[in-house]
Image: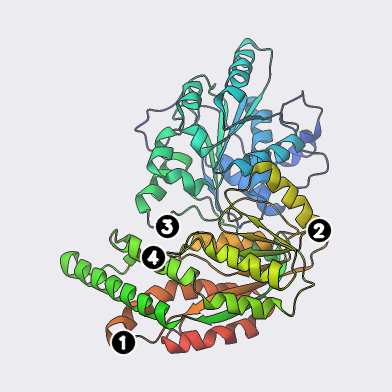
Amino acid sequence: MYLTQNSVQQIPAFRLRIPFAREDKGKYHHQALPGCPRIPPSLQLRQYQHQAVTNWFANNGRGTLKMATGSGKTITALAITCELYQQINLQVLLVVCPYRHLVTQWARECEKFNLQPILAFENVRSWQSQLSTQLYNLRSGSQGFITIITTNSTLIGEGFQSQLKYLPPKTLIIGDEAHNLGAPKLEESLPRRVGLRLALSATPERYFDDSGTQSLFDYFGPVLQPEFTLRDAIAQGALVHYLYYPILVELTETESIAYLKLTKKIGRSLLYRERKIGNNPNFEDNEDLKPLLMQRARLIGAAANKLSALRQLMATRRETTHTLFYCSDGSLETGRSSLQQLKAVVKILGGDLGYKVSTYTAQTQLEEREVLRRQFESGELQGLVAIRCLDEGVDIPAIKTAVILSSSGNPRQFIQRRGRVLRPHPSKERATIYDMIVLPPDLDRETIEVERNLLRKELRRFVEFADLADNAGEARMKLLDLQKRYGLLDV
């Protein structure tokens, strides 16, 4: 059925034609059998979603959709599923996503498309017999379609791997937040016999991992053009407009000393690499730098003065609702636990200012997350205080305001967090983002050039985001001091 595994591309042996020709209109809304893909009658795909579907088919059923957070990747992927069912009588849809809450979120979307998904995660006994039975029914002809939604951790388990060999050739695998699947153990667990492959991510390139990024594209296929950027999404109404307020924060004396020490170590590591193998402007490829850059990012994320800035910001905004607070996951240098900043934020907001908030972390159970989501949307809760688990995929479009106390140096986190706030909602005309940016301390001659190189990429992201805001001029002026300090006016 397929070319050999060593071929450049394992192209499905199905003749796929480009969808959405003039004669296709209206054909998706027929009465489908229970559990078989059907586009909801009320759904109208946007032009860029049509284009994404067309491009994937033109690339022989392979490819990565690099679309801005909140621009409708899930719906686009399910539209592809419906088209495949029409064209080749697709039999199985397998969705792999990184977190349990995304499984339930995908399940809600799948049900709108007439699908009846098996949620294959956590206890093997809760789903394995159901999956085995449905695969048998599919082979015997008594069932027309199977939808399976699983997590990355379940995918690599023996229980799920043992079922992959029974998937029929007419199977589509969708990797949601697919950048995670470039990790070696996960990439090795992806089913090679499945030829129809689709990756979804606003940021498919893996941070510090060029080989993992390449493995991801080797399996799913390249990023399909045109990419759908944040600018595109706002211009076409897929995301809302926003106001952007950078808040510049100074390090304490102790933090400044630790920052300087780390920056000097980073500089020495770069110098050693340059002498050993020649100058490499892409310092992020240097394996020795990873722990140092991570330590420095955590130090910045947990900067103590952010709490003072938060108190000052929210003291005059006690009536603000639908607000998300992103916290740091801790600082290795100061020995702070991953929850210290989060607890401090909750104390300031809930204890001191009387703001109705709740925490939302990896430890929050699925059932409680759903309760929090409803309370947040209704306004019963004014805010959610989170660390990382609201970064990827979580759909809470009611968020109107975000206060970002911490972002890592990873551009993915930057993009995910800001895009999360811009999802459209009937009660939201525009979003507001307060972004705490730590000002590096005054550095000596030895470290100033290192700092300029490190800061350049991060500052470019801040500037780009400021330029897209409705208050672009005001936002850019706020960043000007930082650009002047390090001679980065060209960014």
Give the farthest residue toward the front: 351
Give the farthest residue toward the top: 140
Q: Does residue 288 lie above or below 460 as drawn?
A: above
Query: Which three-letter amino acid code belongs to the residue tagged 4?
Result: Gln
Which residue corresponds to mark 3? 207
Q: Position of residue 206 (x, y in %)?
A: 43, 54
Which residue corresponds to mark 2? 380
- Element marked by disc 3: loop
Asked if the residue under mark 1 is in contact with the one under mark 3, i.e. CB atoms within 8 Å, the reply is no
The earlier-in-sequence mark between 1 and 2 is 2
- Residue depth check, mark 1 versus mark 4: number of the one nearer the observer: 4
From the viewer's perspective, is 155 left or right of 291? right
Q: Position of residue 246 (x, y in %)?
A: 59, 78
What number is the disc on residue 295? 4
The earlier-in-sequence mark between 3 and 1 is 3
Q: Does residue 236 lie above or below 127 as drawn?
A: below
Query: Which three-letter amino acid code belongs to the residue tagged 1?
Result: Asp
Which residue corresponds to mark 1? 444
The earlier-in-sequence mark between 3 and 2 is 3
Task: Give the alpha-carbon distance from disc 4 to disc 2, as whole Å.
Answer: 37 Å
The earlier-in-sequence mark between 4 and 3 is 3
Task: Give the alpha-carbon distance from disc 1 to disc 4, as whole Å.
Answer: 20 Å
Query: Which three-letter amino acid code belongs to the residue tagged 3?
Result: Tyr
Q: Position of residue 356 (x, y in %)?
A: 75, 64
- Element marked by disc 2: loop
- Element marked by disc 4: helix
- Residue depth check, mark 4 versus mark 3: number of the one nearer the observer: 4
Task: Give the alpha-carbon distance from disc 4 to disc 3, as whole Å.
Answer: 15 Å
